[in-house]
């Protein structure tokens, strides 16, 4: 399957230490839209050398699993411990981190002076997420909150890539019910398929066809195989083709997106 469309823009300072993720979707994704809220917090020690904060980053190990056919594979990666220099400028209640031509601007909320205080990344849509820094005399705490909209991800993928898009291949109407549920209606077969996501990104397929059993595809599987249900291809997509050569492309196997499970990576 093709690569999924780019869904997030990432603004990074100092090799990814401080990141801001923002949704590509023009419409805001708020808690009322049913999104899955992910929050991670990291606490670091730091020192200041002139106009540079030097943050001590500990070793970080992350891993995920995926299916290679019927075989469960596990991938692990280690980021070694290191000191991360972050040039900065403080002016009143404004803090700027500078990396080359890139700058992250934060605004202090509440009391504090110099670097000390609670800081929020400026000019961001708080419905999509937020980045907060809490700086004391000895620690720097980064809290990143992101509201995930799985359905926007799915619809971007469905419409991606011109004549090879699913939308160009199948006579199927796609309706966003919430950020965690989408309805697909076959305009030829009349079958209605609902895909639902849980907070871990696992996808459950259900159908109004009683002969099509509910099936779950797992984002981070513990056993294999791990595919979309067979009926989704053979009895749903294939039964609702558009009159284009691209409609035959569903014969290509689905290769799931593998996500990194830390917002900080």
Image (tube, rainbow, N blue to C red):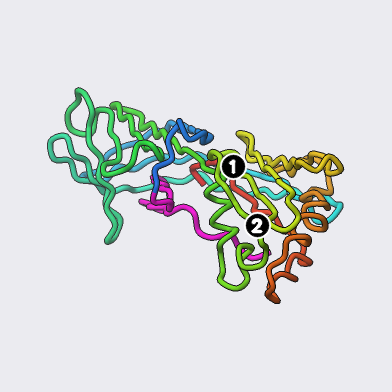
Name the residue at 73% across, 61% down: 240
Q: Give the residues in magenta.
A: 1-26
**Label 1: which residue?**
261
Residue 33 position (above or below residue 84): above
Q: Residue at x 70, y 76 (%)?
A: 245
> Reading the chain from its start, which is encountered first: label 2 or label 1?
2
Badge number at residue 172: 2
Q: Quadrant of the N terminus?
A: bottom right
Determine the CA span between mark 2 and mark 1.
32 Å
Q: How many marks?
A: 2
Q: Secondary structure at mark 1?
A: loop
Coordinates of residue 121 in the picture (x, y in percent):
30, 40
- Left or right of 146: which side holds 104? left
Viewer-proximal residue among 254 and 68: 254
Crowdedness of circle 2 by 10 Å Cα count: few (<14), some, many (20+)? many
Regarding mark 2 in the picture, which secondary structure is present there? Answer: strand
Of residues 45 and 29, the one nearer the viewer is: 29
Q: Is residue 24 magenta?
A: yes
Relative height, residue 101 to residue 57 (above, below): below
Q: Residue 173 — which label?
A: none
């Amino acid at each position: 399957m093709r690569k999924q469309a780019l869904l997030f823009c990432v603004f990074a300072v100092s090799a990814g230490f401080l990141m801001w993720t923002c949704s590509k979707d023009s419409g805001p994704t708020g808690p009322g839209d049913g999104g899955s809220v992910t929050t991670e917090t990291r606490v670091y020690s730091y020192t200041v050398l002139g106009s540079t904060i030097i943050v001590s980053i500990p070793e970080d190990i992350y891993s995920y699993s995926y299916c290679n056919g019927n075989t469960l594979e596990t991938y692990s990666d280690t980021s070694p411990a290191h000191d991360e220099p972050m040039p900065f400028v403080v002016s009143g209640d404004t803090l700027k981190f500078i990396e080359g031509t890139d700058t992250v601007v934060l605004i202090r909320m509440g009391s504090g002076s110099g670097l000390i205080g609670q800081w929020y990344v400026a000019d961001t849509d708080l419905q999509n997420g937020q980045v907060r820094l809490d700086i004391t005399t000895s620690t720097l705490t980064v809290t990143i909150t992101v509201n995930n909209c799985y359905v926007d991800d799915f619809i971007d993928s469905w419409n991606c890539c011109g004549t090879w898009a699913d939308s160009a291949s199948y006579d199927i109407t796609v309706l966003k019910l919430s950020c965690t549920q989408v309805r697909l209606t076959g305009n030829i077969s009349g079958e209605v398929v609902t895909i639902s996501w849980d907070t871990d990104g696992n996808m459950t397929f259900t159908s109004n066809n009683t002969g099509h059993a509910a099936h779950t595809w797992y984002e981070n599987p513990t056993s294999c195989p791990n595919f979309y249900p067979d009926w989704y291809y053979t009895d749903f997509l294939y039964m609702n083709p558009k009159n284009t050569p691209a409609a035959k492309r569903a014969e290509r196997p689905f290769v799931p997106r593998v996500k990194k499970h830390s917002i900080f990576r």
